[in-house]
Structures are given as structure tokens and as C-alpha cells.
Image (cartoon, grey):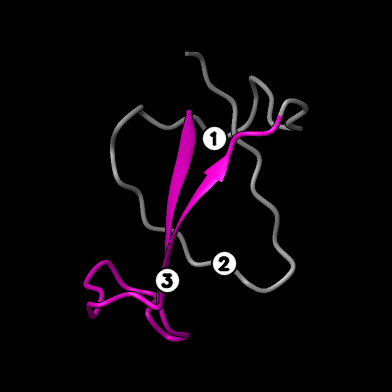
Amino acid sequence: MPLDVSEYTAGAATQVLAEPCIIEQQLAIGKTPTAGPTNKRLAANQPEIFGVQPGHRLAVTGTV
């Protein structure tokens, strides 16, 4: 199960994003994530918008 990620230009830190995005990617969910039960939980199959800085990391867990 991949994770779909769209990247936008810097400064697009609102929930109204100017299309098209810079790049769309499908990332493989890794076998050893560091996310746990006390981290932020998100609903499956719901788009979410987060502003991140270079060097930030993302951990994803899921079931198939």
C-alpha cells in the first residue's frame, strides 16, 4: 500500500493550494516506522495538508 504525496511551492502553507503541484509521488510504506500509538492518528483515505521543512521525516503505519 503506497502513500500518495503531492509537493507544492514554498509558501503554500494554506489549505487553498495553487495547482498544479510541483511533483506527485507514491512512496512505499517502510517496514520499520517509528510512529507509535501516542503519535497523531489520521483517518484512512482522507487527504491531509501539512507544511513541512527540509529535513523533516514522516513515519507511516498501516494495514493491508
Where residue 59 appears, x then y in whole percent?
A: 66, 40
**Residue 32 visible in the picture:** yes
Q: Name the residue type under label 2.
A: Val
> Is most of the magenta stretch helix, strand or loop?
loop
**Residue 7 visible in the picture:** no
Residue located beneath label 3 in the image: 23
Seen as rendered, the residue at the extreme top is: 64
Q: Name the residue type under label 3.
A: Ile
- Residue at the image position 49 percent from the left and 67 percent from the top: 51
Residue located beneath label 1 in the image: 40
Please state the extent of the stretch shown in magenta in the rendering: 1-30
Q: Residues within 10 Å of mark 1 (few under 14, many from 20)?
A: few
Q: Above or below — where is 25 with respect to 47? A: below
SS at mark 1 in the image: loop
Tell me the mark number nearer the camera, choosing from 3 and 1.
3
Tell me the mark number nearer the camera, choosing from 1 and 2.
2
- Measure how far apart labels 1 and 2 are at the Cα level: 15 Å
- Residue at the image position 78 percent from the left and 27 percent from the top: 32
| 5 drawn magenta | yes
Q: Quadrant of residue 44?
A: top left
Residue located beneath label 2 in the image: 52
Image position of 47 (left or right of 42): left
- Residue at the image position 25 percent from the left and 74 percent from the top: 17
Where residue 24 appears, x then y in whole percent?
A: 40, 63
Q: Above or below — where is 19 with respect to 64? A: below
SS at mark 3 in the image: strand
SS at mark 2 in the image: loop
Image position of 6 (left or right of 53): left
Where residue 64 appears, x then y in whole percent?
A: 47, 13
